[in-house]
Image (spheres, coloured by chain):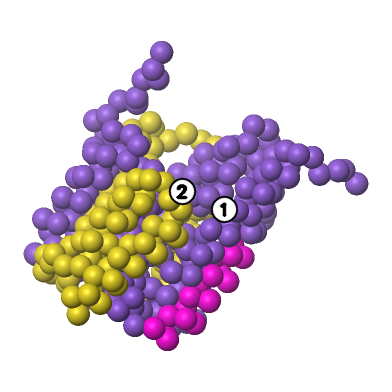
Amino acid sequence: MRRIGPDVRRVLAASLTLSAATGVFALSFGVLAVGAGASVLQACVLSLATFTGASQMSAMSVVAAGGGLGAALGGSLLLAARNGVYGLVLAPRFGGRLPLRLVAAQFVIDETTAMMTAQRDRRLATIAFWSTAIALFTCWNLGTLAGALIGGAIDPHRWGLDVAFTAAFVAMLAPHLATRQGRRAAVLGAAICLALVPFAPVGVPVLAAGAAIFTGLSTPPAEPAS
Amino acid sequence: MTWWLVAWLSLGAYGFKVLGFVVVGGRRLPEPVTRCLLLIPAALLAALVVKDAATTGQQLVLDERMLGLGVAAVAAWRRLPLIAVVVLAAGATAALRAATG
């Protein structure tokens, strides 16, 4: 049997740390989902089957505000579309037959993409993908279950948990503000949303904010500083 | 909450994953398309932030949530872990609500 080298150990440690942190985040998703009107089972099925945090949060946020099915789905599916872009990036680094790829596809999310693209060779990249996928999937779903069970027992408003959505979105948004294009899309998206809130049905302003991505058309790729 | 939301969201999310990872695979999309797609999180997350912090239904509302938003922004800017950002923001809002009763 091959010894586990320091490279592999480093990758495994990183994926476990990342997954543990995500598990705690899943706890707040569980609490918030139940607060928004989902049953414990619905919260758990969302985490198992949808398995992409920002979309799950976004759907619950619109449902909590009283938005309809279409509005809740629209924004969430737009957010889910970015996993398709990650798939484009990961596919060339990923071997394996079609059935394996169809299983692996479920785990193509922010964290596995970040972990896999951070590795310098293909073997480490594959280890990073699967270790992150398995650990994160486990923590995400256990965290959701725990949160959903706790959620029914507390008053979300009193504990400030309605703000937990906002705070989670702020934290997820922060890395996207590192580039000028990101900041421009964020400011425009926020402005579109606020302008439409008084007139459009609940949930639609968030979906409409998606139009801000077209600012990407006018921006040539950033030149690397030399 | 309806099960249709759970079903459609799960199907749709998996559909996008398979579309990029398996169907399109290693083929390259036109550069401007990729650039626009990568801006989705920035545009939508920013919209979700202002919606959750400053609106109730169709009303623009400024209340205790603004403190939570401010605390979250500072915590995220200081690169605290996600869970710390969430706990600090919720705690600050809860404390202000308890104080102003």
Where, by quadrant of the figure, is residue B47 drawn? bottom left
Q: Residue at x 16, y 50 (%)?
A: A191
Question: Toward the viewer: A220 or B70?
Answer: B70
Residue at mark 1: A18
Q: Position of residue A157 (x, y in %)?
A: 29, 77
Q: Can residue A73 be seen? A: no
Q: What stretch is highlighted in magenta?
A: A136-154
Parent chain of label 2: A
Residue A84 badge: 2
Q: Majority secondary structure of the magenta segment?
A: helix
**Vertical order, B32 against A113 (above or below):** above
Image hue for chain B: yellow
Q: Does the magenta stretch include residue A131?
A: no
Give me the C-alpha separation between circle 2 and circle 1: 22 Å
Question: Toward the viewer: B15 or A46?
Answer: A46
> What residue occupies the far left of the structure in this picture?
A199
Under tag 2, what secondary structure? helix
Q: Does the magenta stretch include residue A151?
A: yes
**Vertical order, A8 against B92 (above or below):** above
Q: Which residue is drawn at 47% across and 34% down?
A: B28
Q: Which residue is drawn at 76% across and 39% down?
A: A6
